[in-house]
Amino acid sequence: MSEFAVFIIIRDGERKFYADRWADTHVYREIVWGPEDLENWLEEGPLEEECYDDSSSGVIVDHDRRVLSWTPRFEGPLELPRVAAAFRKLLVTAWPGFEVREIAQGMASLEAAAEGVDVMPGPSAEPGLIACDGDEEIWGDRCDTVRMAAGIDEEQNETELDDYRFDEDDADGGSVHWDEGDRGCWVTVIDQDGVVQHRHVAEISQDVIRGAERVLDEYLSLPARELPPEIHLKEGIWFDTRKRVLGYWGNPFGQQALQHFQAGWRGWTVNWHADGGYESQCAASGPSGIPLSAPESIGQLAPVLLSTKRFDFQTIAGAIGGQLKTTAIKATGCLYVVLCLPILLFGLVSGDMRSVGTTILVMAGIIVVMFKIIETRVRRKFKEGPAAVLDRDEDRTNRKSPTTGPQDDRQRRNRLDELLMDAGLPRLADAEPHFVKGDTLHELVS
């Protein structure tokens, strides 16, 4: 369940390798504090051999060329394009004098960059990233078809709604209801008569990039939806069939699909909207929508950056255990009430409420004792499990701080506030009303 992140420091032609078993999910949190904090944190741990094969993401700090390269995962808060753009401003501010490069092609390109090969992506995709011929995959593990992106089982021809789908509130005339944290793709089709129709899917699928115009009919066969707030969107695409214009937006790597969109949609004007994609789609379709404000963007990002928790087995187990304990307490309480009801009924009929009260109190004591015994045994199982033992063994050999940057909460907050101000972004006081509220597990996986 742990995934390594590799960190490579290049200075005077010499490469030093470091690795962290738990940094992959939040590698952006480790690099946002600048080069000095990152290297001080890495030097708390041991040097490693070349470890590309064991890693899922990586960072290269090239002091010779003054370049910071990293492999971002556009997940959690960075899944929102406006949040990803805000984070990039923070990163550029935290690394003065460095060129910041995001590597789209994964660990192979990271290894090439560490060898001094220029893997800076141009305005079009490299051949290895996206393929347009035959049934070759494009954009990696994206859905093959519109129907799959809409949650439709191709074999059974049945609709299976995933978390990103919309629910309709019949009492409000078909208004859209989003669950917190749901994110997907907004599709707009403008027909020859200028009628605007909206649809919602998980993502832009591969057949759309390949350019088969039948995808428009497939989109229109889906249930009609309304214009969604930007906070629920990781990307969007619109088709104006009158003007034969296609526009799309999303995470920063989307531009690399431009030439493949152009090849697939010949006779159409294809535009990639790097900035303000949501507003551009709103302008094309009419309504103004609900864009994500700058304070809201920081509110999505800041809780992770402020956290000093290590994403390891013990933290995960503690978060899961806390949720399980809460659920178990509620279930035990319900069971206790159910068991007490017939006893109370007996007391009312017999008139012997004194004995009934004593019985209920004794039952409560027995249940509490049994609950504590079971809780203790479960905790012991977790602590003696192989993953927990692995964590303790690593802690004995690797005494690194849980994360980079200040470890004191107040100092960390002040430092981030200064960084936000220097980057021209809203300060924490303005963003705090929009902080993502959640428990430890939510914080870790967001």
Image (cartoon, helix red, strand yellow):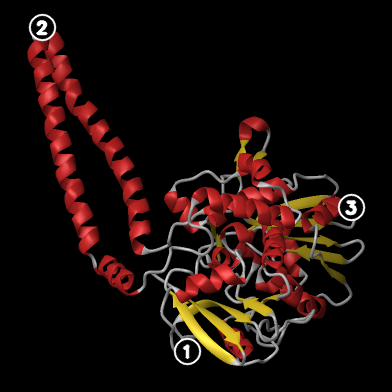
Contact, CB < 8 Å: mark 3 with mark 2?
no
Q: Residue at x 74, y 62 (%)?
A: 217
Residue 29 % position (x, y): 56, 63
Question: For mark 2, what is the residue?
Answer: 351
Q: Is residue 154 left or right of residue 336?
A: right
Residue 289 % position (x, y): 78, 45
**Quarter of the figure that contains the N terminus:** bottom left
Question: For mark 3, what is the residue?
Answer: 194
Q: Residue at x 64, y 75 (%)?
A: 139
For the residues labelled 1 and 3, the Cα–Cα distance comes to 57 Å
Q: What residue type is labelled 1?
A: Glu
Q: Which amino acid does label 2 sit on?
A: Gly
Question: For mark 1, what is the residue?
Answer: 50
For the residues labelled 2 and 1, the Cα–Cα distance comes to 79 Å
Callout 2 secondary element: loop
Give the mark, 3 or 2, whose residue is nearer the N terminus: 3
**Picture layout, residue 345 above or below residue 415:** above
Q: Can residue 275 be seen in this view?
A: yes
